[in-house]
Image: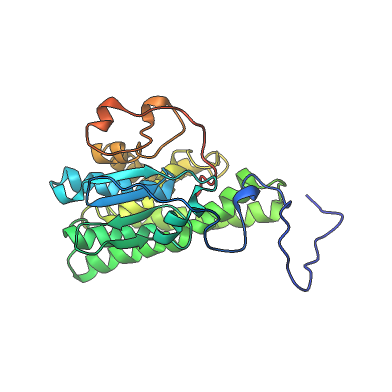
Amino acid sequence: MTDSSPYVPPKVWTWNKQNGGQFASINRPIAGPTHDKELPVGRHPLQLYSLATPNGTKVTVMLEELLAAGFSGAEYDAWLIKIDGNQFGSGFVAVNPNSKIPALMDRSGPTPIRVFESGAILLHLAEKFGAFLPSGGQERAECLSWLFWQMGSAPYLGGGFGHFYAYAPTKIEYAIDRFAMEVKRQLDVLDRRLADNEYLSGGGYSIADIAVWPWYGGLAKGLLYGGGEFLNVQEYKNVQRWTDAIARRPAVQRGRMVNRTWGEPASQLHERHDASDFDTGTQDKIGEPAGAAS
């Protein structure tokens, strides 16, 4: 598509609140709270404030995996933070000054510890419980390398490809082509790694897999941005095998339900405060969340 009136950047950028896009109403170039709102606190040591986007799913899957492995100290309350302005409440900003989900308050010790950024939360929990993180050597280095690979790569998938392919008010061929090429390169990176390794660390299932799976597993199954066919995700056979293997894990199936407010009602558990919540459910379909790429 050719734009007959090409954009010329001004000398100094200014915020145009009417710039369009599905999430324009919640995007802003400044940080800090917009309103006073305290966060609820439940009875468990770990308090999670989140939404079941890929980044949120990483943490609920990790917590469910820890509980399945017998770590009772990983019991948690998962509170729903919808990305509709609630992320700018004073209580949430105090836990995460970046106003993004997920955010964790670890209240297991004498002084509460806040942890934000999903990768940091995974690493905090892995070190706290001594699980899903190799103890040393090449396997640990691989695990951490793939964890940080995901943190650096996913913005090209979400804010890049996902935004311009699914959410931008105008389809821009250059932008879609540029990010589609990068995402396919990322899938190829994963596929080559998984050709000779069951899991990303080269050993057992780890926080590297837990971090990468909600993003690239979701993409591999056509669940992100409706771009599966466009990106021909079926050609990445090793990614498909790995995705299916992780999806069969009961803790993963539980974790992806938590803080989910869209899809089939049976797949939703808006808040989780006890293991029995998976039996009783808190389903009440709200619709697809704003900022689904978070």
**Which color scheme does this rendered protein use?**
rainbow
Asked whether the viewer can see residue 25, the reply is: yes
Q: Is residue 71 left or right of residue 223?
A: left
Image location (x, y in percent) of residue 154: 47, 56
Q: Is residue 121 left or right of residue 174?
A: left
Asked whether the viewer can see residue 195, the reply is: no
Q: Is residue 232 above or below residue 194?
A: above
Residue placed at 38% from the left, 64% from the top?
148
Residue placed at 17% from the left, 66% from the top?
135
Q: Quadrant of residue 16?
A: bottom right
Pick the front one: 187 or 28: 28
Q: Is residue 162 above or below residue 134?
A: above
Q: Quadrant of residue 230?
A: top right
Residue placed at 60% from the left, 50% from the top?
26
Pick the front one: 95 or 241: 95
Q: Is residue 110 left or right of residue 211?
A: left
Q: How many marks?
A: 0
Image location (x, y in percent) of residue 217: 40, 45
Image location (x, y in percent) of residue 73: 16, 51
Image location (x, y in percent) of residue 145: 34, 66
Residue ranking furthest to the right: 4
Q: Quadrant of residue 257?
A: top left
Pick the front one: 167 or 260: 260
Residue placed at 70% from the left, 45% from the top?
169
Residue ranking furthest to the bottom: 11
Pick the front one: 279 or 205: 279
